[in-house]
Image (cartoon, rainbow, N blue to C red):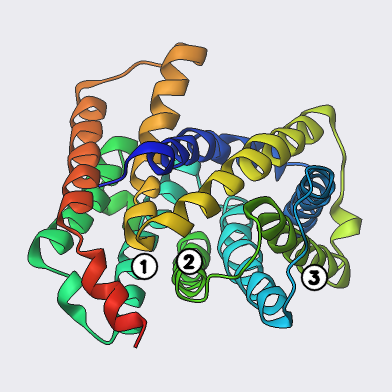
């Protein structure tokens, strides 16, 4: 079970990233997805790098640490997060949140495979993971028929992105680099920013670029809240807890989105919404209590 600063970091991730789906949806209306994501990552990475150095955080001393940080940045951000940005060009935020929640299942799978021992995937853990997916579907009001008839370009990209994100999280957990949390997150964001921006330029996205005040506001919000605050908190939590436990934030994000819509936009909360939130929160708590990180960690160290 998460406690103390790790729990606080986890809650920050839930709240910060729970608000980003709408911001992404707004931003990609006028800014092509790869340039949108690339500029976001690079800007946030550069700001965090400058701040970390000003606070006295040292650069990684070993080449291995730089390599791990770059690899993690490419999997988590250039792969997983960029997939969400691209998918929201033709996928509603609700559908995106359902498919993004599958990253928890992928993470549990990769952790068990990495440990060469599936003991962590107990029946209670698997039941909790399945319950989280069900609760997310109920929460956003998507019926199986609607999911089946959704534009599958988005779901396909999100499925691949969820797998990439999960692998990157588990890789980071088991190859934890010797680097300060802010420097580490900054290097990851810079690596992703360079890679994704380059991809956008090569694919000719500049021709589709139409900068608007709304698009810039969405970009700035994601730089500050999504990257500087959210991603830094995520890497801290990932350094001190099981990757599977931390990844249950994807179940909480839709709950946060619904509550923000109710409190800020006056959106109605129906009985279905309450049922969905109860299922999701039950799944998160149940998975955290059921997961057995010690045995996984012992196997991974061998």
Q: Nearer the viewer, residue 63 or 223?
A: 63
Helix, strand or loop at mark 1: helix
Real-space Cα separation, disc 2 to disc 3, in angstroms: 23 Å
Q: Which residue is mark 2?
A: 169
How would you rate the neighbour count of disc 2 (Cα within 10 Å): few for under 14, some for 14-19, many for 20 or more?
many
Q: Earlier in the sequence, mark 1 or mark 3?
A: 1
Frontmost residue, 152 versus 95: 95
Q: CA distance from mark 2 to mark 1?
A: 7 Å
At x 68%, y 42%, the residue is: 228
Which of 117/32 is in front?
Answer: 117
Which of the two labelled residues, at mark 2 and mark 1, occupies the earlier sequence position?
1
Q: Which residue is mark 3?
A: 199
Q: CA distance from mark 1 to mark 3?
A: 27 Å
What residue is shown at x 47% (from left), y 33% (from top)? Answer: 15
Q: What residue lies at 82% left-to-right and 44% top-to-bottom?
A: 47
* Neighbour tally class for label 3: few under 14, some 14-19, many 20 plus, Cα within 10 Å: some
| Residue 290 percent across, percent down from the top left | 15, 56
Q: Which residue is mark 1?
A: 107
Of circles 1 and 3, the one toward us is: 1
* Residue at far left of view: 123
> Label 3's element?
helix
Outermost residue, right side: 207
Depth order, front residue of 189/210: 189
Horizontal side, residue 165 vs residue 228: left or right? left
Instruction: Name which of mark 2 and mark 3 comes first in the sequence.
Output: 2
* Secondary structure type for disc 2: helix
Q: Is residue 150 visible?
A: no
Q: Are marks 2 and 1 in contact (CB under 8 Å)?
A: yes
List x then y, in percent, for residue 93. 49, 42
């Amino acid at each position: 079970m998460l406690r103390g600063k790790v729990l606080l970091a986890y809650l920050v991730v839930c709240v910060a990233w729970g608000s980003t789906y709408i911001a992404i949806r707004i931003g990609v209306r006028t800014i092509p997805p790869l340039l949108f994501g690339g500029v976001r990552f690079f800007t946030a990475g550069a700001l965090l790098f400058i701040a970390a150095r000003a606070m006295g955080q040292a650069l990684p001393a070993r080449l291995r640490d730089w390599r791990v940080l770059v690899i993690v940045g490419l999997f988590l951000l250039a792969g997983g997060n960029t997939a969400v940005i691209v998918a929201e060009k033709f996928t509603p935020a609700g559908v995106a949140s359902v498919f993004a929640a599958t990253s928890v299942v992928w993470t549990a799978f990769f952790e068990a495979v990495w440990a060469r021992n599936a003991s962590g995937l107990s029946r209670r853990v698997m039941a909790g993971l399945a319950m989280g997916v069900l609760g997310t579907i109920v929460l956003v009001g998507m019926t199986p028929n609607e999911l089946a008839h959704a534009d599958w370009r988005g779901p396909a990209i999100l499925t691949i992105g969820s797998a990439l994100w999960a692998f990157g999280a588990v890789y980071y957990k088991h190859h934890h680099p010797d680097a300060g949390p802010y420097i580490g997150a900054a290097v990851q964001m810079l690596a992703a920013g360079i890679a994704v921006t380059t991809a956008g330029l090569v694919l000719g996205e500049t021709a589709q670029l139409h900068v608007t005040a709304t698009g810039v506001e969405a970009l700035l919000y994601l730089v500050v809240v999504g990257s500087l605050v959210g991603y830094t908190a995520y890497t801290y939590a990932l350094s001190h807890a099981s990757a599977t436990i931390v990844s249950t934030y994807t179940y909480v994000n839709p709950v946060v989105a619904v509550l923000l819509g109710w409190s800020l936009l006056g959106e109605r909360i129906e009985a279905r919404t309450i049922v969905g939130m109860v299922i999701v929160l039950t799944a998160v708590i149940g998975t955290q209590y059921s997961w057995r990180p010690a045995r996984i960690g012992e196997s991974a160290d061998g």
